[in-house]
Image (spheres, helix red, strand yellow):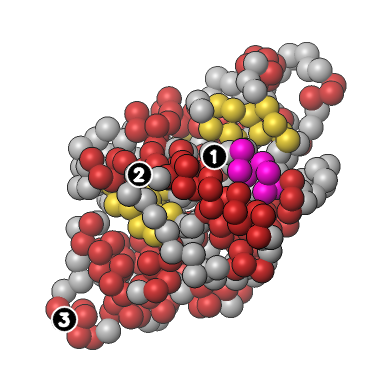
Amino acid sequence: MATSSIKSVPIMAIPSFSICHKHELLKEEGKSRDPKRQEEEEEGLSYEFLEMLDSLPKERGWRTRHLYLFQGFWCQAKEIHAIMSFQKHFKTLPKDVILATIPKSGTTWLKALTFTLLNRHRFDPVSDHPLLTSNPHDLVPFLEYKLYANGEVPDLSGLASPRTFATHVPFGSLKGSIEEPGAKVVYLCRNPFDTFISSWHFSNSIKSESVSPVSLEEGFDLYCRGVIGFGPFWEHMLGYWRESLERPEKVLFLKYEDLKEDIETNLKKLASFLGVSFTEEEEVKGVVKAVADLCSFESLKKLEVNKSNKSIKNFENRYLFRKGEVSDWRNYLSPVQVERLSALVDDKLGGSGLTFRYC
């Protein structure tokens, strides 16, 4: 029986997962394949799945050769495969927590903060904490990149409550799996300008060797047309934003820039939403600050586990930590590009109530 790719944390912060069975769309033995499709990004996918893939609109990819338009958003072939698997098999339990982001919006930071908040009575945030030896992506696994990757269907029955997972999937494609009344979603959003620059750097750092680098100009045009992993970015943001307004008890909408400006206030807000509010005693003892310090970009970046280990797919953790700044876009975008993206944001988000700070 196959075993999961989830790494076991020595102190058992996460139990190991065993795989019950493979998704039906895995490659079938003896099935003929078009030799032109023998690419790394499609390895292991069945003939039937690739036939379905051929029916989808596609564009030039950022990290792989192509992105495909699936359920209204753009993603890679193997991401679609995993998403179909977890949409079929994954269902939340009453106390589950789902962390959602569009890529390069502070996902690693949100995972660290949430894991530490939920487990602070098990693990002291000032000493011998799992984050000191484990990357946040090992502690809070992705549905599409880890648990259901490669057609696997994990046995999640051994996880302690509250179970915590993460995803980049837009709300419209996630909601069918999170109908359980007690399950909660935390969404972290970052201003579109910095999200683009971070995505551009990241994609070129970890892209397949068979894919040519994406120039800033080409990437910017793709981004403004919505062709970015799990984009269009405006639809991704608006999906969770609107749900947070309609059901604030179920979806908490946070902004990266707000966390950077006042992490302690936002930590208290997150803890309250998760049902693990800080006590007066904890605040007096400086626990809020201790959590913020432990999970800070600077603290995580200098840890050995985040310099060379691999927690997602086959790229090193160091690529997850570049600058973590607000307004880095000013160092890259031309006045014309700023004008184009500003107009796009106004057009797509105008009237929604969703606004950003850019510096």
Residue at position x 54%, y 39% in the image: 231
Q: Is residue 305 left or right of residue 288?
A: right
Q: Which mark is residue 351?
A: 2
Q: Earlier in the sequence, mark 3 or mark 2?
A: 3
Question: Secondary structure under badge 1?
Answer: loop
Q: Which residue is mark 1?
A: 231
Label 2: how many residues lie within 10 Å, few (<14), some (14-19) or many (20+)?
Answer: few
Question: Residue 232 appears at what percent x and percent y?
Answer: 53, 39
Quarter assignment of residue 129: bottom left
Q: How many marks?
A: 3
Q: What separation in Å lies between label 1 and label 3 (alpha carbons)?
A: 43 Å
Asked whether residue 312 appears in the rendered view, the answer is no
Question: Secondary structure under badge 3?
Answer: helix
Q: Earlier in the sequence, mark 1 or mark 2?
A: 1
Q: Amino acid at mark 2?
A: Gly
Q: Nearer the viewer, mark 3 or mark 2?
A: 2
Q: Main secondary structure of the magenta part?
A: helix
* Extent of the magenta region: 219-225
If the image is split into quadrants, where does the N terminus sit?
top right
| In magenta segment, residue 221 | yes
Foreground pick, 62 / 280: 62
74 to 257, vertically: above or below:
above
Q: Which residue is mark 3?
A: 281
Q: What separation in Å lies between label 1 and label 2 (alpha carbons)?
A: 20 Å
Residue at position x 40%, y 45% in the image: 350
